[in-house]
Amino acid sequence: STEINNFGFEIHRQAKDDVWEQIGFVNGNGNSNSPKNYSFMDMNPAGGTQINYRLKQIDNNGQFEYSDVITINYSINNFEIYQNYPNPFNPSTTISWQSPMDGNVSIKIYDILGNEVAEILNEFKPAGRQEIKFETASLNKGLTSGVYIYKIEINNNELLYTMISKMTLLK
């Protein structure tokens, strides 16, 4: 198909609270008489097994039109921990993981000597991709610059899965 005055496409994902959020943008080709292919990869799909997406096609003059909603069935079949971001960090960082099972999730922070310095999560979470923000300001004791270990444990009373990774605090 042809394109006329195509500025580009906003990629929208429907969040858990049914609110649409823009997660990316792909530039259009302006005017074209030949078919064009576009692609976008959601690098941080939200938790859950079905995710709704739509496009907002924007013309050069600012007019826009929404595409039909597309539902993607997203299956998670393995445990994975993602590197916190930003890293190094100060004063906060986001820790992300995915799990194929519901269960109680515990996240603890340890100093390089193995001393526990914080437990930032201990609650039930559904299967899927999850994230939590670690705020050093929320701790009663200050943390010094250095390398810390975060440990995520997921327990559904039949299986206990543990993942660890390191992060760096720079003050």
Image (cartoon, rainbow, N blue to C red):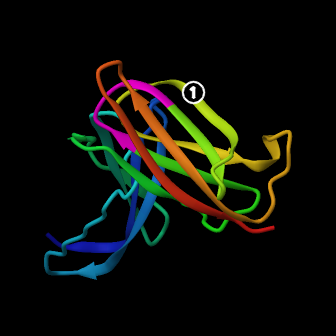
Task: Pick whichever, 152 or 17, lies toward us.
Answer: 152
**Residue 104 in the image: x percent, y percent?**
45, 24
Q: Nearer the viewer, residue 95 or 7?
A: 95
Q: Residues within 10 Å of mark 1 (few under 14, many from 20)?
A: some
Choose top left, top right, bottom left or bottom right for residue 116: top right
Q: Which residues are magenta?
A: 98-105
Point 35% across, 56% down: residue? 42
Q: Quadrant of the N terminus?
A: bottom left
Q: Residue at x 31, y 79 (%)?
A: 29
Please determine whether, in this image, residue 113 is positioned above or below residue 48. below
- Identify the main secondary structure in magenta: strand
Q: Label 1 is placed on what type of residue?
A: Asn
Q: Residue furthest front?
A: 113
Relative to the observer, which residue lies in front, 153 or 134?
A: 153
Reading the image, the residue beneath label 1 is 122
Q: Is residue 22 magenta?
A: no
| Rendered-image quadrant of the C terminus | bottom right
Give the residue drawn at x 43%, y 61%: 24
